Image: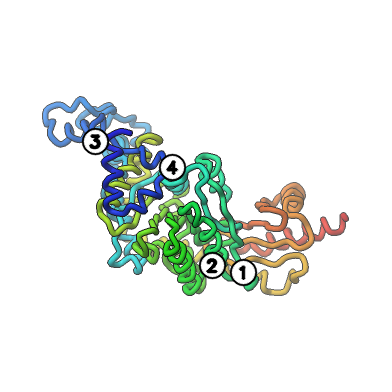
């Protein structure tokens, strides 16, 4: 093992030995080189005032070399904020502004000890970092049966972790905190679990209420008290899109510093929150009462970034930072929120109107995010998906035998009734064909 990795591990052990026990083999071995090209370049940038022959970019006229056919399209921004490499951890001001935003939108973080957000290449990259640092072969990754399919690729296929699922909903259609607890306690012999908390949930569009959120935290705390080291990952991809009475902040705030055996990790980003999917700007943030643990985890995260993508794209970080600082930002974001809420409310009004009855489908609770799911009673989900796309020109997502995911986020409010009329007609077609 490289001595630099060993030093980081000793810092983590001294700050919280349980966090060290959570690390995968790769997590223990990774480090960000203190002596290398990047560190030498940083030293030269600070002190080499005559010539700096260290940076792997081309310069011209005192700034990054660039093509006018590109710059003329981006003339609102200075070349220095576009063409050079962003630091591996991301633009410092962007990290600061995002942290301030987190505190503003998550009051439960006040007074908690957590690190500075590290920029990732959107949320999938953040989840991949978690997998690299904490998921080893056979480690349990706990998440509900209604989930984003990419978790399997990220944690099981890439890292050979064991996937442990539990029903998302109880019979009363509330969050199944008992199921979560039992899934966590089933890992007592291993002494470790990674739990993924994705709210608003993809695919159902469900966010728990305040009492349900407290029950989730209590389940994780109970597992920790019984000897399970829990990496509690808040996948907050759709954060802020809360349309009804539900949690209005991330569980990261309540999980931060809740127990020495719980490491809270927040994965979020501008991707969906700020409607810039293709910009690929996300963040990973750790919570710990130990400053040494936070510093060491940051260095290990930078090591993963250096070994994979080197650093995130500079232009999109500049664009996001500029938007977050703009006076019109809040007003414009609220305007888009109202559009999204209007679509969600329209879907619920249609489904509750009695127009379609409840013999062909019911729907899972939804109150947030981009999606909702129908539970089909009379036809197979994949059969219906194929029928709709080929006969009605309508695209949906089939999940398992019974569930059909509808992304109301990309359908204008005035077209939603037609969409559900067509789904209903497709079901009746298939029923008649039998």
Q: Residue at x 67, y 62 (%)?
A: 374
Lower position in the chain sequence, tag 1 or tag 2: 1
Instruction: Tell me the distance, in whole angstroms, between the alpha carbons under discs 2 and 4.
Output: 27 Å
- Residue 170 is labelled as 1
Lower position in the chain sequence, tag 3 or tag 1: 3
Q: Can residue 230 be seen in the rendering of this structure? A: yes
Residues at circles 1 and 2 in contact by the CB criterion of under 8 Å: no
Residues at circles 3 and 1 in contact by the CB criterion of under 8 Å: no
Residues at circles 2 and 3 in contact by the CB criterion of under 8 Å: no
Asked which quadrant contains residue 402, the reply is bottom right
Q: Which residue is mark 4?
A: 132
Instruction: Tell me the distance, in whole angstroms, between the alpha carbons under discs 4 and 3.
Output: 21 Å
Q: Which residue is mark 2?
A: 177
In the picture, which quadrant includes the N terminus? top left
Lower position in the chain sequence, tag 4 or tag 3: 3
| Tag 4 secondary structure | helix
Position above or below: 328 against 88 = below
Q: Which residue is mark 3?
A: 34
Lower position in the chain sequence, tag 2 or tag 4: 4
């Amino acid at each position: 093992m490289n001595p630099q990795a060993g030093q980081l591990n000793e810092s983590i052990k001294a700050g919280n030995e349980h966090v060290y026990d959570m690390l995968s083999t790769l997590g223990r071995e990774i480090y960000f080189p203190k002596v290398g090209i990047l560190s030498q370049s940083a030293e030269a940038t600070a002190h080499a005032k005559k010539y700096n022959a260290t940076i792997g970019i081309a310069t011209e006229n005192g700034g990054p070399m660039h093509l006018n056919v590109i710059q003329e399209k981006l003339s609102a921004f200075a070349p220095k904020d576009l063409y050079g490499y962003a630091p591996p951890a991301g633009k410092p001001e962007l990290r600061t502004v995002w942290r301030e935003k987190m505190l503003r939108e998550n009051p439960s973080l006040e007074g908690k000890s957590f690190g500075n957000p590290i920029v990732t290449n959107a949320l999938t990259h953040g989840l991949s970092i978690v997998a690299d640092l904490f998921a080893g072969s056979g480690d349990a990754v706990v998440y509900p049966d209604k989930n984003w399919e990419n978790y399997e690729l990220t944690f099981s296929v890439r890292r050979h972790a064991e996937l442990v699922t539990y029903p998302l909903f109880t019979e009363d259609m509330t969050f199944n905190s008992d199921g979560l607890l039992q899934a966590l306690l089933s890992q007592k012999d291993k002494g470790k679990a990674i739990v993924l908390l994705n709210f608003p949930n993809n695919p159902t569009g469900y966010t728990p209420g305040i009492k349900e959120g407290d029950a989730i935290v209590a389940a994780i705390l109970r597992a920790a008290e019984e000897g399970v080291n829990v990496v509690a990952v808040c996948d907050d991809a759709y954060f802020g899109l809360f349309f009804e009475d539900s949690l209005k902040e991330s569980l990261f705030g309540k999980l931060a510093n809740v127990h020495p055996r719980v490491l809270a990790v927040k994965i979020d980003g501008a991707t969906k929150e700020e409607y810039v999917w293709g910009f690929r700007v996300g963040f990973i943030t750790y919570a710990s009462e130990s400053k040494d643990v936070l510093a060491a985890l940051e260095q290990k995260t930078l090591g993963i970034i250096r070994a994979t993508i080197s650093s995130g794209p500079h232009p999109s970080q500049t664009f996001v930072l500029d938007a977050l600082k703009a006076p019109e930002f809040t007003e414009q974001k609220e305007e888009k929120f109202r559009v999204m809420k209007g679509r969600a409310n329209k879907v619920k009004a249609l489904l509750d109107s009695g127009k379609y009855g409840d013999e062909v489908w019911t729907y899972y609770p939804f109150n947030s995010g981009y999606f909702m799911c129908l539970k089909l009673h009379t036809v197979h989900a994949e059969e219906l998906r194929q029928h709709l796309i080929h006969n009605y020109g309508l695209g949906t997502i089939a999940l398992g035998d019974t569930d059909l995911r509808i992304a109301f986020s990309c359908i204008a409010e005035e077209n939603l009734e037609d969409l559900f009329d067509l789904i209903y007609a497709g079901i009746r077609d298939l029923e008649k064909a039998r």
